[in-house]
Amino acid sequence: MDASCFLCGGIPILDVNSLNCLSLRWHHNSSSPFFGSISLLNSDNRSRSAFCDYTLSTTFRFQQYNTFNCSSGTKTTTTKRRNHKNKSNSPANRNLKATTSIIDTSAGGSAALADGDARQQRRQKQQSYGAEKQCLTDEKKDRPVNVCALHQNGDPLGWRDLGKCVVSWICLGMKAMATDFALAEVQGEFSEFRQRMGPGLTFVIQAQPYLTAVPMPLGLEAICLKACTHYPTLFDHFQRELRDVLQDLQHKSLIHNWLETESWKLLKELANSAQHRAIARKVSQTKTVHHGLGMELEKAKAIQSRIDNFTKRISDLLRIERDAELEFTQEELNAVPTPDKSSDSPKAIEFLVSHGQADQELCDTICNLNAVSTSTGLGGMHLVLFRVEGNHRLPPTTLSPGDMVCVRTCDSRGAGATSCMQGVVNTLGEDGCSISVALESRHGDPTFSKLFGKNVRIDRIPGLADALTYERNCEALMMLQKKGLQKKNPSIAVVATLFGDKEDVVWLEENHLVGWEEAELDGLIDSENYDNSQLRAIALGLNKQRPILIIQGPAGTGKTGLLKEVILLAVRQGERVLVTAPTNAAVDNMVEKLSNTGLDVVRVGNPARISPAVASRSLIEIVNAKLAIFRTEFERKKSDLRKDLRLCLKDDSLAAGIRQLLKQLGKSLKKKEKETVKEILSSAQVVLATNTGAADPLIRRLDSFDLVVIDEAGQAIEPSCWIPILVGKRCILAGDECQLAPVILSRKALEGGLGISLLERAATLHEGVLATKLTTQYRMNDAIASWASKEMYGGSLKSSSSVSSHLLVDSPFVKPTWMTHCPLLLLDTRMPYGSLSVGCEEHLDPAGTGSFYNEGEADIVLQHVFSLIYAGTYP
């Protein structure tokens, strides 16, 4: 007979496809984790018992001496090669699949293998057991997986692509997710799951807590980080796990027919959705062009063709950049710490990441910490407090609140010894000896408890923060391609303007769909407080018919203050505004600017990454303030019910009723929180978040915004800007393409154009009609501004008379020296014939960023700064 079993992750049901068998059930032995028992139900309802050695390759021996050879498909490559010659003719091996095993017997249920063959296979199993325990080592030696070689198309990635250990890691996470999914229906809480679940990015986001709760295989973190955002792979594993969980619940009589359950029906709805088919299939969809603007179909097709070409090119560049980030992440995780020679500790506390340099003032990794306590916070995340051994202090570190980190145990040298767990730095202790980290772990998960009593290492790895960022950028491109020209898209005019040619823009203007003129400002603002370039930018920004405005603001031109005024006036004329920026610091800066305007402002984002100065404006703080009285009453009722429960434990029926009341009370709190969040965001006049944070379901479920403002847009890659743009009717992009550009690790992606921001690209479109420039600076001496204006702005930047001649020596308590009298000092470190001075040679960053560093020039700058401080200049 043929049978298929699923042992990956300990799934309890083994389906048997035979005329004589209905099912195999695994009974796990908790006292001995490697052994258990199996029940075989045949057609005459007689049960046959068996024991099972719960290893990756097992043999089942039944009481009737029938032997079932079960190879779960998770043996190492080395073991497979060793046994290939002897087993190549086996029917089981001819039909072996990634997650399916074949069990061979005779038709009458007798053993298919002779006793000699059985003994030989048992010997082979004993010989290969040691190799199977070293699954990870063999995986890395015999079949290394290259991150760049993983092309994430519409097909699920299997063990041949990822390796068996990574597949097992995904199975465990998806099994936990499927269990929660099914039990929610049994407990009557499935409506909440239905609201949260969806195809594509929504599904990936829901899966992340379950995947991050399972430790990643040591040395394969980069592969895991890439696989955890591949929707077809996650969905493929999830549907298998959900099927097995539902079948197990049916066997326990908790459900009647697993095919008729709401959870299975929802899964089928997701699988049949257009979005799922677009992502999880290789065959490209025939795109229907919606000429919602009313233009000719051929013109709309031409615009759609440009969108298709753009999204395909940028998607490929995003994948290349993501691979470069993951390679860099894996190198950092595999690095061995260098002990601090000045420390008297016998163990390495800090890890100086050199990046090709001799030394580094701050460290990215702290080693040999001890977990001392744990608590719950940050929306249910586990806060774990780590402390340095003895009386030692934390080394100078780049770690700061909000940083994404990798937490794992380490040996005495500081080398990583276990799998990686992701977390967020919560606080650095005021005593300088402790650090608090919020670990992503679900309720009841014991993973974080394994950190106690062991040496712990904390790494700040930038790549860890990019899993959802990458997925959200890709989804934004997909939405741009699919819905950019649909009539229901609120930003259809923005899309048509940025991807249309000159004739298309003229047609839009002639049909009064867009307008480029300035709005009237009479009586709205005091014109004496603004220069002409600022007044023009405000007038253009208030024109509701203008789909997009690019404000180029060089340093010191008052760009942030101008945006504040535009937002204030837009709200006064009845518009709802979404404000974003590429970094949390830039968003918090805008929150501070808008806090004293009297507007209803809400900051959405991770509480650990929001500045304490604006925490009172964060969504979670506003919700807590509104629900303070409700929660007080909730805690009182909860306490009373628990007291009653303790008094009624002997009465089962009464105790069950009280437990039901406690459950309903908890549901009422969740419902109230959801209603409050929706009320706050719907009534807010200004919502602020990062570019990728604008993809939060809390924001996407809101009605479209009238105006989207993106600050520091020159520092953001274009896909991240499309995330907020697609939820608004018009947009304003402010920044300076001559200052900081987007950070790109991959030279290939940089040369392909990923480093070109939307602000830079749009400023040159349609003969510059989309852009305006601020031309007067209010920050620096004219000697500095004139040099910058000549070198970078074509001589267009002017200096205000209030700052054009001021010097450092004019400041109070500053001593008159040649340095404080000099507004601009240019030092040339090149010797004659173009060679660099000794000690000022340039070096290429070995991290692969393509940047150069010069230690000699940095020392010169440091000496100059110290001289200014000694002269009385305030740092």
Image: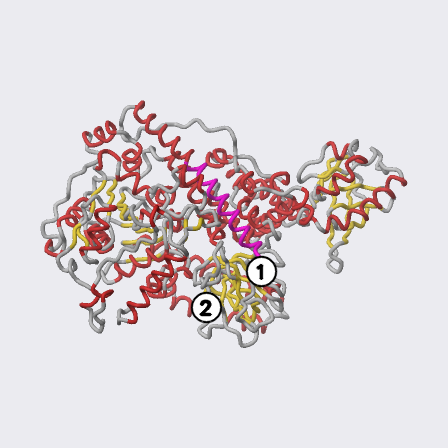
For mark 1, does the 10 Å Cα neighbourhood hold few (<14), some (14 to 19), or many (20 or more) residues? many
Q: Residue at x 54, y 73 (%)?
A: 643
Q: Is residue 318 magenta?
A: yes
Q: Which residues are magenta?
A: 314-337
Q: Residue at x 59, y 66 (%)?
A: 655
Q: Position of residue 40 (x, y in %)?
A: 78, 44
Q: Position of residue 507 (x, y in %)?
A: 22, 28
Q: Is residue 250 magenta?
A: no
Q: Which mark is residue 408?
A: 1
Q: Residue furthest bottom?
A: 391
| Secondary element type, mark 2 | strand
Query: In terms of depth relative to the viewer, which is nearer, 241 or 332?
Result: 332
Q: Earlier in the sequence, mark 1 or mark 2?
A: 1
Whether 596 is drawn above or below 187: the answer is: below
Quadrant of the image occupied by residue 751 = top left
Q: Position of residue 871 (x, y in %)?
A: 26, 71
Left or right of 215 in this view: 872: left
Q: Position of residue 747 (x, y in %)?
A: 44, 42
Q: Which residue is mark 2?
A: 428
